[in-house]
Image (cartoon, coloured by chain):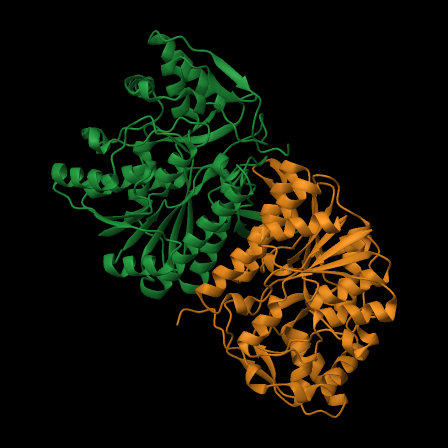
Chain colours: A orange, B green
Amino acid sequence: MKVLVIGGDGYCGWATALHLSSRGYDVGILDNLIRRHWDAQLGVETLTPISPIHQRIERWNNLSGKAVDLYVGDITDYAFLSKTLREFEPEAIVHFGEQRSAPFSMIDREHAVMTQVNNVVGTLNILYAMKEDFPDCHLVKLGTMGEYGTPNIDIEEGYITIEHNGRKDTLPYPKQPGSFYHLSKVHDSHNIHFACKIWGLRATDLNQGVVYGVLTEETGIDELLINRLDYDGVFGTALNRFCIQAAIGHPLTVYGKGGQTRGFLDIRDTVRCIELAITNPADAGQFRVFNQFTELFSVYDLALKVKNAAIAMGLDVEINHLENPRVELEQHYFNAKNTKLLDLGLQPHYLSDSLLDSLLNFAIKYKGRVDEKHILPKVSWRRS
Amino acid sequence: MKVLVIGGDGYCGWATALHLSSRGYDVGILDNLIRRHWDAQLGVETLTPISPIHQRIERWNNLSGKAVDLYVGDITDYAFLSKTLREFEPEAIVHFGEQRSAPFSMIDREHAVMTQVNNVVGTLNILYAMKEDFPDCHLVKLGTMGEYGTPNIDIEEGYITIEHNGRKDTLPYPKQPGSFYHLSKVHDSHNIHFACKIWGLRATDLNQGVVYGVLTEETGIDELLINRLDYDGVFGTALNRFCIQAAIGHPLTVYGKGGQTRGFLDIRDTVRCIELAITNPADAGQFRVFNQFTELFSVYDLALKVKNAAIAMGLDVEINHLENPRVELEQHYFNAKNTKLLDLGLQPHYLSDSLLDSLLNFAIKYKGRVDEKHILPKVSWRRS
């Protein structure tokens, strides 16, 4: 089965591409490599020294005997996208190819506009290219749990049945996203839903939680296959960032009270979830939504877990409650459903002491690469 | 009070600008005149011979003694927008400046992408310009009743209180828009809501129904002030189109069964609704949604009303059920609330025989300008 991984040079994309390749899928990677460029522009680097994409793929080929096709280009360029699809002929498209940082989208107007145009147009182009040439192809699109915000009722998977004034309907779950980035994913969801309805396309929207960890079975086997691990205030996400902060003796940066509760999952589950979605495709015309996380944690609880694991390793760790640069509730109800991927057979890697130890040791190994001045958040959601 | 009408050269925008000017507001019009250009590109013309914007404004000035400032440029050009706002210093911005045709957005990929980028970026730019320089300005944004689609439960005004698993919250009403154009308005709504939340901006989203009629108190006083009236398959909307079809003896074009029910309003109520929104601004941080229509009709019922009025005038009229070019339900539950503008004092002009007579006579007066080959819909929602 031919699977095109758009954004296959990124954190989740690279791990997914290798996992699928290892599992026997015929994998292509499409990526414009812009994330490496953004890192350069912001002056940040991943904790881990990642190799150029051509070398990564060559190394994988040498070690595994599996070929991965590479298409370097931009999906907002429709001619390129269309030509690539005709050449590769995908049966499934996994779409990670978006600007994925909330703080990046909140830097200023230019970054907000760029994030929304880039993400919305890229996804529209994929939908049109599928409609034109590959109407049976299955789109597996990365959404985010952040599309839902923090409603005071249970979060269902994409849809909710509402009884109102004696009548009943099942409707798209209301969205309250918390950044221009998260908004772009909400826009995508609405666009994809519509394309499935009018053109009979099949799509799965994976509303993913915050991903942590770095090693997967495939990326761990060789230094040239190493995955990126972000710790900076723009691209770094909660648990990974905490582990790196602990490793270098920097206080763990909890924004505000830390009662913000979110869905989390191990990157080893990300790659399995994608595979489960691919092997169980949506029906023609179906826009399916899975909530892709395995556990709920508050940010403060996570910081505490990292602190305890670090102390057990002899590290000296403090937790700092920074003034929250975001506009968000810091204490709230949060209960999200995540049964659909479990029903398909997902066996979660729950957050464990051994994972924390492994991640901390990994961070210690590369701690010489950390540039401390990029750790604190500099982007504010507020009007100055 | 200074009010900037973005899109003030269009059908609703022009009528609104003159109405507000006549009522004593200090009005500016910002428009890129692109709609006239699109007409030229499609080879269509409004039924009515509309004058160039500079002439229209000069004529209004001569007749009323009121000046209207004109800013010709594009709100997707942030430098132009920001400069214009600093010069005009609006206390309210009425935003009609979007691509507003569903069929236009469905022509092909280019039109879909252009519609979404144009509308979303224009609105984002307004939000950023307000945040930067005019955080207390009130944004009155034109949404559409089409954002809701046709759910099987009552449509509330923007928000719905949901009880679910023993808990309760009031959340944005779920959206099921029916074209890439309608989707662009849903994207806008989410973006504006977020900007109000994080920056404390004040905004009113007017989810407007289908507007009919052409004469308002101001546009009717002189031929040079005449408003546009679209009858073509791309920009023409239900009732106006039917009247023009009846005037030239063309069968009334009902798409499919005609059971599609929508909210409608007279253009004389559009201008009043805008004024009501302006004089009763949203609070700081509030994203308010009003459903702006006065009556619900099915498309077939409207065709029948036009047919009967036309027959009474001695015209020979048939109703043709065309194959529906859109993907939409043709029989469905539809019950939308519209009490908020009534509560503010709106006194509706309900659809009457005299309005139909007046509109039919108006259409007869200009029927020599109709190009019959542009009447039938040519844009299909479906995959060919």
Report the side of B102 relative to A296 (left or right): left
Report the side of B315 relative to B17 (left or right): right
Report the side of A86 relative to B180 (left or right): right
Q: Which of A48 and A325 lies nearest the eye of the viewer?
A: A48
Q: In which quadrant will I find the C terminus of chain B?
A: top right
Q: Quadrant of residue A147?
A: bottom right
Q: Residue at x 40, y 57 (%)?
A: B125
- Residue B116 in sight from this viewpoint: yes
Residue A183 sits above or below residue B146 on the image: below
Report the side of B265 relative to A250 (left or right): left
- Residue A289 in sight from this viewpoint: no
Tag count in the figure?
0
Q: Residue at x 42, y 11 (%)?
A: B317
Q: Position of residue A293 (x, y in %)?
A: 72, 62
Q: Residue at x 75, y 63 (%)?
A: A294
Q: Quadrant of residue B89?
A: bottom left
Q: Position of residue B295 (x, y in %)?
A: 41, 29
Q: Position of residue A318 (x, y in %)?
A: 63, 88
Q: Which of A300 and B307 lies nearest the eye of the viewer?
A: B307
Q: Position of residue B226 (x, y in %)?
A: 25, 31
